[in-house]
Image (cartoon, rainbow, N blue to C red):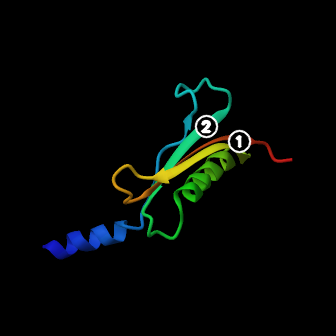
Amino acid sequence: MRAPIIVSMLLCASCAVTAPVRTTDGFGSGDGTYRVSARVSPSGDSDAKAEALEEASHFCATRGASPRLVSSDARECASGGACDEAQITFSCAAPH
């Protein structure tokens, strides 16, 4: 019975969790900038900032645009460094 639980925990050790993209003001009436955050295990193959940037790219691509990074913040999780977190603020720029 314990084996499936342990296997599930090990498989999720390299999981990435990305929060939904939100406007920076939280109400949808902002200045065209958005925010997304991501959390990954430090033993994973990618880092949290890369995961957040990937989500921003997907978000902007659905609008026919590319992401332009406005700011970013990366750190260890507050839970004792068991993961890495990043939050980016970006806008979607029309292709040239």
Q: Residues within 10 Å of mark 2 (few under 14, many from 20)?
A: many
Where does the image place residue 2, in percent across and percent down from the top left? Answer: 15, 73
Q: Is residue 41 found left or right of 64 in the rendered image?
A: left
Instruction: Report helix, strand or loop for mark 1.
Output: strand
Up/down of 36 relative to 27, above or below:
below
Pointers 1 and 2 in contact (CB under 8 A)?
yes
Q: Is residue 16 found left or right of 88 in the rendered image?
A: left
The one nearer the camera, 26 or 78, is: 78
Where does the image place residue 3, in percent across and percent down from the top left? Answer: 19, 76
Task: Give the number of marks.
Answer: 2
Q: Is residue 78 found left or right of 64 in the rendered image?
A: left
Task: Please tell me which residue is depicted at 54% across the width and 51% down the height of the picture.
Answer: 74
**Outermost bottom residue:** 3
Badge 2 amino acid: Tyr
Using the image, tell me which numbered label, if any, was put on residue 47: none
Where does the image place residue 51, in percent across and percent down from the top left? Answer: 55, 57
Badge 1 amino acid: Cys
Instruction: Report helix, strand or loop for mark 2.
Output: strand
Residue identifier under label 2: 34
Residue identifier under label 1: 92
Task: Please tell me which residue is depicted at 65% across the width and 47% down the height of the picture.
Answer: 62
Up/down of 21 relative to 11, above or below:
above
Task: Please tell me which residue is depicted at 57% across the width and 55% down the height of the picture.
Answer: 49
Q: Quadrant of the N terminus?
A: bottom left
**Outermost left residue:** 1
Task: Please tell me which residue is depicted at 53% across the width and 25% down the height of the picture.
Answer: 27
Where does the image place residue 37, in percent across and percent down from the top left? Answer: 51, 46
First-in-chain label (1 vs 2): 2
Residue at mark 1 to residue at mark 2: CA–CA distance: 8 Å
